[in-house]
Image (tube, rainbow, N blue to C red):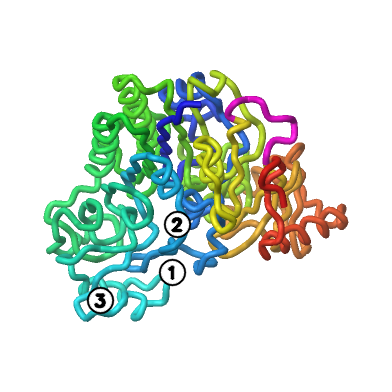
């Protein structure tokens, strides 16, 4: 097999129901994504490793659940140190060892080892991954921008990086490799969305997505003869919701829907660049999202009758399906049968083992521990059991769930980190229960209305025991030969 180029586009907070080819009742047209699906394979049971951004990104790049790291819940906040361990193999590092050029364009959100003027580390002053804006502002004032900012993409396997780290966190400036392109010198305007901190004069939130798209296309245009890996984590449709004029009014779902249209436009620009370069046929192009939709999804239902989570339950942060089941399309014309649908479970962290499988690399035992190759699924030659024996889901507030077959067990009295509106609960028929956990059969209850915890204590016990084994690292998820437990 020729080593393909690999482009991994990660949308930010885009729900399963936002992509029209997933959910016919969507109020948001996504023609480029629909076209991508007709040219490749659409996965209907793909999951982010977490229902929130930072831990999903950690797992995408390491093939390891983030709750195995030092961050057990929450996200990396502004000025936090690097989350990905210095000696941990990443997808980028693996592919670089196999002769790939590796590039990251977009939202990093995995922390940096910020150089401070007093020689200390930011987390000497701040508890890691705990929110506290005023204290964090004072730490930000100590950053020495004349020094390299370590712990980011170019220290974790990427040859190049360009992005804005997190669009709603300071510093509001562009990063290139391990430096900022311009030192932020003015306070963020009060009327500009985001946490307080320093910005480049005239920083424009609306300009972020167009510039990231331009840089990603340029990366493809400038590619040489060596195969390349482009990790392209978008800043949309995450807040701030700032669609450009070209996309305003495209949807029937207000500014949010228009911003999803802009995501679709970015995917189209990447597809066009690959075609123009003449490398589309031997490029594995994946589009997906880091978790489910934000809580503005409730307003989309009330105002526009658009369900970002489709018929699933839950949103970003939740352990229910809507928090982590995500849109996922893979196209690789030389390998993937066009216009196909895959119903098997996959997890975004499976990128690591898949890349190893594609390139013939051997993963060390201490790398990609939770990753399973989906290459058989991409080829369309897997058996009816798929490739994953089970998948763990994890919420913002450290709730765990485990999926095996059609069953999903939530090891908590509720899968909701966020409170559901009463009107939504009434509309869906959700009721309270007194059980210490939740058990659903997704084959006939995809909306997770009927908690079967009390009706199937045997299944609860089996799944709870399996979850504890996974957390202890004593069992692997694969049901393929080669990396069996």
Q: Which residues fall within the magenta stretch?
A: 378-387
Q: In front here: 102 or 184?
A: 102
Is residue 321 positioned above or below 18 on the image?
below
Between label 3 and label 2, give the one nearer the viewer: 2
Tell me the chief SS of the magenta region. Answer: loop
Numbered disc 3: secondary structure: helix
The residue that appears at 73% across and 54% down in the rendered structure is: 409
Is the C-beta separation of discs 2 and 1 under 8 Å? yes
Q: Mark 2 points at which residue?
A: 54
Q: Closer to the N terminus: mark 2 or mark 1?
A: 2
Whole-number angstrom distance, CA of label 2 to CA of label 1: 10 Å
In the rendered image of this protein, does residue 353 appear above or below residue 125? above
Q: Which mark is residue 396?
A: none
All told, the count of numbered labels is 3
Pointer 1 or 3: first along the chain = 1
Q: Does the magenta stretch include residue 417?
A: no
| Residue 228 pos. (x, y %) | 36, 36
Residue beneath disc 1: 129
In the image, residue 82 above or below residue 244:
below
Circle 3 packing at 10 Å, graded few (<14), some (14-19), many (20+), is few
Q: Nearer the viewer, residue 258 or 92?
A: 92
Q: SS of the residue at dot 1?
A: loop
Indicate the position of residue 130 as horizontal and vertical percent values. Answer: 43, 71
Residue at position x 20%, y 73% in the image: 141
> Callout 2: 10 Å neighbours few (<14), some, many (20+)?
many
């Amino acid at each position: 097999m020729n080593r393909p180029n690999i482009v991994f586009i990660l949308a930010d907070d885009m729900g399963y129901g936002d992509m029209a080819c997933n959910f016919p009742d969507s109020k948001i047209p996504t023609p480029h994504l629909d076209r991508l699906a007709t040219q490749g394979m659409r996965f209907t049971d793909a999951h982010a490793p977490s229902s929130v951004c930072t831990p999903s990104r950690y797992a995408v790049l390491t093939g390891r659940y983030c709750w195995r790291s030092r961050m057990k819940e929450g996200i990396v906040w502004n000025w936090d140190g690097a989350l990905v361990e210095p000696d941990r193999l990443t997808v980028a590092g693996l592919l670089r060892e196999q002769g790939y050029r590796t590039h990251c364009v977009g939202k990093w959100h995995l922390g940096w080892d910020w150089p401070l003027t007093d020689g200390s580390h930011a987390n000497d002053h701040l508890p890691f991954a705990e929110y506290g804006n005023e204290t964090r502002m004072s730490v930000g004032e100590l950053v020495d921008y004349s020094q390299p900012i370590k712990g980011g993409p170019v220290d974790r396997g990427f040859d190049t990086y360009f992005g804005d780290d997190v669009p709603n966190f300071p510093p509001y400036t562009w990063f290139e490799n391990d430096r900022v392109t311009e030192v932020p010198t003015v306070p963020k305007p009060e009327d500009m969305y985001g946490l307080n901190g320093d910005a480049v004069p005239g920083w424009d939130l609306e300009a972020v997505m167009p510039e990231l798209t331009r840089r990603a296309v340029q990366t493809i245009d400038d590619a040489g003869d060596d195969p390349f890996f482009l990790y392209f984590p978008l800043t949309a449709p995450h807040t701030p919701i700032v669609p450009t004029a070209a996309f305003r009014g495209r949807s029937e779902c207000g500014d949010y829907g228009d911003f999803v249209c802009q995501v679709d436009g970015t995917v189209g620009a990447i597809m066009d660049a690959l075609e123009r370069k003449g490398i589309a046929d031997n490029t594995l192009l994946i589009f997906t999202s880091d978790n489910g939709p934000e809580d503005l999804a409730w307003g989309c239902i009330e105002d526009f009758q658009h369900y970002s989570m489709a018929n699933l339950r839950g949103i970003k942060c939740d352990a229910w399906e809507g928090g982590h089941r995500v849109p996922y399309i893979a196209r690789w014309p030389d390998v993937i049968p066009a216009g196909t649908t895959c119903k098997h479970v996959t997890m975004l962290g499976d990128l690591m083992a898949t890349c190893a499988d594609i390139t013939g690399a051997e993963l060390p035992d201490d790398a990609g521990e939770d990753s399973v190759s989906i290459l058989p699924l991409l080829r369309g030659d897997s058996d009816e059991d798929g490739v994953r024996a089970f998948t763990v889901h994890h919420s913002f507030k450290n709730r765990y769930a485990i999926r095996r077959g059609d069953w999903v067990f939530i090891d908590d009295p509720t899968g909701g980190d966020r409170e559901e509106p009463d009107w939504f609960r009434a509309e869906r028929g959700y009721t309270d229960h007194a059980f210490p956990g939740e058990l659903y059969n997704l084959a006939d209850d995809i909306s997770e209305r009927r908690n079967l915890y009390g009706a199937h204590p045997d299944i609860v016990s089996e799944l709870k025991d399996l979850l504890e084994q996974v957390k202890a690292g004593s069992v692997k998820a694969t049901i393929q030969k080669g990396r069996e437990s």
